[in-house]
Image (spheres, rainbow, N blue to C red):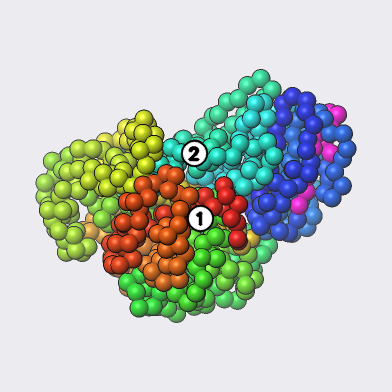
Amino acid sequence: MCGFVAIYQPVSATYDLKSLVRMTQAIAHRGPDDYGYCTSMQGSIAVWRDAPPKGVTAPGVAMGHRRLSILDLSEAGRQPFLSADNRYAMVYNGEVFNYKELRKELENAGVRFHTNTDTEVVLAAFLHWHTECFNRFNGMWAIVIWDRLTNSLIACRDRFGIKPLYYQQIGNNWTFASEIKAILDNPTAIKGINALVLAQYLLDFGNPRDGNTFFEQVYEVLPGTYMELTPTSTRTKRYWNPPIKSNYITNFPTLEDAADYLRCLLTDSVALRMRSDVRIGTMMSGGMDSTSVISVVRSLMDSSNVAQQATGDQLQAFSAIFRGTNIDEEPLIDEVCAYLDVNANKVFPHQQNDPLALLYTSIWHLERPYFNSVPLVHTLLMRKARSIGVKVVLNGHGPDEMLAGYPTKYIPSVIADALAGLRWSDAIHEINCMRDVHKLGRLRTLRRAINILTTRVPLLKPARARSESLSLLTHEMRDIVSRHLYRYARISSMNCLNNALHEDFFYQSLPKWLHLEDRISMSESIEARLPFLDYRIVEFAFSLPNQYKIQNGMTKLVLRKAMEKYLPQSVITHTRKVPFSGPDREWICGPLRPWLTATFLNGKAHLYDYLNATAVRELLRDFLDSPSTRTHQYQVWRFITTELWMQIYFYGKRTC
């Protein structure tokens, strides 16, 4: 797990090596254990650390790398990594967890290895299979590989975008990096706000799409794709396509069959992600996802020396506790820890008296605004893990967006599918279950289902909500939004649930979580691994019919069935979806209130260049006087984090 910078200049130019070092040091938190650089020079490659070569003028690349040592802690894993013949240079961030299996396959084909790193296996796989190797990788990665002889470059990102990879093109020169701040530290970088992305975010929390970011002319390599650059051409190719199922023909005739297979897949996925030469722990809430991962880890500890060595005598779990609130899951956490013999390490976000300092730190690392205080809570959890020597954590992201974990969002989609299929009794049954299990009125549920059925998962909110949000924008920002129509779900499936899951998994909900997970874990120099995002599990999940995901008001049904013998029944039957959140209102109305008042009510916030100051001040006063409206809570948090993002990246007020 690492961070890197790669500057590609297909024509002859002089490298500014001091800038390369500065850009690489900007992301030193991603790799505090080691570092290295390489540059092209007169048709060869020079590798260096503290004494850069002189007279570097040849076309090619300059690369910088920061290493977080996880596998093979020796200097053999230092990057940039060169092929034996010095033709290829590679920088790589992430882990290819099946590297041992790939290594054996390559050895059988005659390839000889000189280290025990997965890095060498990744480059050898590319040399042997070229870009076909990406489909053989099981893991998370961002990779840049340069070919000295052809002066060409490949930049690739994993299937789901777990690991980040950004770029900016200025003329013929390209800069790639693991984080945007490294690109912005290039003296020639274009630095500005992407007004369209910002407007759409301020309007409805929309996630940037099509490779756009919040920064002008800074883009991300799309998940599941690679870019190939030569002196005369540029092309982007998708090596993996998201699964689309419109007419389900499942290989699993019963729910029990599907559940057994899911358990097998998850066990193998966790086993691969337990490969580590440093200590592993887990993040934990009281929900199905993280506790499922922990259950599998515990079973592997009893049967696998690899797992036992990685975790030590007792598995360490890390949880946020919110006593006295409706988001507290401490009783379930304690029950699972006792049931599985796991040590609970708890953090108490309410005890933080200075969330503003945490805010500056988290926004600096996130490089974007965020709509709640989860990044702050996650920072506390990662700091706790690092403080007791845990360097790798497993987390449970993914099932909500592929197995339908949000009842009020996804059950109406199931009802819409029943209505479309004229299965009236099924629709009525799930409508009644929504009332009985999740306390949502039948008429309200029916209206949601009909809206989904008629609009096929629009990305815009209802007209009333749009009108309220638009009133907050300046006239200029409204014009920007009006010139760019929102797009609908991109798939042709007539299955409403599948459309909704596809949109959330690949474009909206999950990408935001993955962005947060990478940035906050790496800010504390910790590697986060996500077992549910094994591509085999994802492809399996999207092959399942609705009734294996939602039935009788129960969400993630196949996962509950898979884990029913391995977790307490209180977890299996728990139906209330508790979102991972933080003390948003308490912090806004408490320790953040003086800053909020000085910046937005009594001052001229930079955000007022984009928002209607009068409307924002009115909304803030209403919220501070009566902080009970959930929508306003998210809007206020959005104002705070956007203002801080602008201060940090465009007005030099970095205090982290």
| Total numbered badges shown on the rendered structure | 2
Name the kind of residue labelled 1 in the image. Answer: Leu
Q: Read off the magenta span.
A: 35-46
Magenta span includes 152: no
Find residue 585 and report its horizontal and vertical position in percent.
37, 67
Where does label 1 land, which residue?
A: 644
Q: Secondary structure at mark 2?
A: loop
Where does label 2 land, which residue?
A: 194
Name the kind of residue labelled 2 in the image. Answer: Asn
> Which comes sooner in the sequence, label 2 or label 1?
2
Q: Residue visible at 54% across and 52% down? A: 647
Find residue 473 and report its horizontal and vertical position in percent.
36, 44
Q: Residue visible at 51% across and 41% down? A: 193
**Most prominent secondary structure in the magenta stretch?**
strand
Q: Is residue 511 visible?
A: yes
Q: Residue visible at 84% across and 50% down? A: 50
Q: Is residue 264 left or right of residue 465?
A: right
- Measure how far apart labels 2 and 1 are at the Cα level: 16 Å
Q: Residues within 10 Å of mark 1 (few under 14, many from 20)?
A: many
